[in-house]
Amino acid sequence: MVKKNFDKICLIGMPGSGKSTIGRALSKHLKFSFYDTDEEIELKKQSKIKDIFNNEGEDHFRKIERSIFKKLILNRNTVISTGGGLILKNKDLLKQTFNIYLNCNLETLTERTSRNNYRPLLKNNVEKNIKLLFNDRKDIYNKISDLTINVTDNTQKTIRNILDFLKQ
């Protein structure tokens, strides 16, 4: 396998794993640009993710997500926080990036995602739905990742672990 460059870093993982928080901090340390695919989608559509899901459906959302992701990976020296489901339709594009899987235990994911109601695939029963999503996606995250980091610890330790790996 060809070693990937670290100039296009994607953070992948479940909703609530800390991709946006860690991505922002990591990009500052690296002096890279930072993009959050969900934020970019909301800017482009002038609509919240949950409203796009409710009004236009998940398939439409995934098409917009792919289009935006395709443009973002053209940039170098970039950290991209991806939506939790981006891995479902973009395995080919993720081959062009260095992918860090932020692995988090189910208990922590449930606690974090229960704090808000803007995650459309978790509505109604967060605990049940996060477990279903986790079981559906964990093998894909593991397969796509170039580096897996356990993020159940604090954010600064996670960033140090990533930076230590990138310096090798």
Image: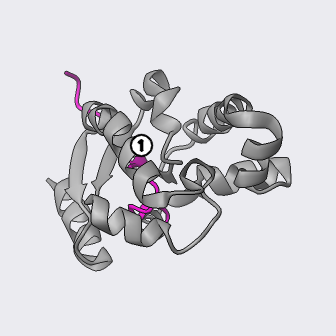
Q: Amino acid at mark 1?
A: Leu
Give x and y (percent) for residue 69: 60, 38
* Quadrant holding the N terminus: top left
Assess whether residue 74 is covered by the magenta stretch.
no
Q: Is residue 53 left or right of residue 153?
A: right
Q: Nearer the viewer, residue 26 or 153?
A: 153
Magenta segment, which residues? 1-20
Residue 7 visible at all: no
Q: Residue at x 46, y 49 (%)?
A: 129
Q: Nearer the viewer, residue 131 or 73?
A: 131
Disc 1 marks which residue? 133
Q: Residue at x 54, y 53 (%)?
A: 122
- Image label count: 1
Q: Is residue 9 left or right of residue 73?
A: left
Mark 1 element type: helix
Q: Is residue 127 left or right of residue 54?
A: left
User: As displayed, is residue 47 above or below residue 21?
Assistant: above
Assess whether residue 10 is covered by the magenta stretch.
yes
Give x and y (percent) for residue 119: 60, 57
Magenta part mainly helix, strand or loop? loop
Q: Is residue 16 left or right of residue 43?
A: left
Give x and y (percent) for residue 88: 48, 30
User: As displayed, is residue 112 above or below residue 126?
Assistant: below
Q: Residue at x 63, y 66 (%)?
A: 117
Name the residue furthest left. Answer: 168
Please name the colour scheme applied to the rendered image: one colour
User: As displayed, is residue 51 above or below residue 162?
Assistant: above
Give x and y (percent) for residue 56: 80, 36
Q: Nearer the viewer, residue 152 or 40?
A: 152
Name which quarter of the figure residue 161 lies in.
bottom left
Residue 139 visible at all: yes
Q: Nearer the viewer, residue 120 or 16?
A: 120
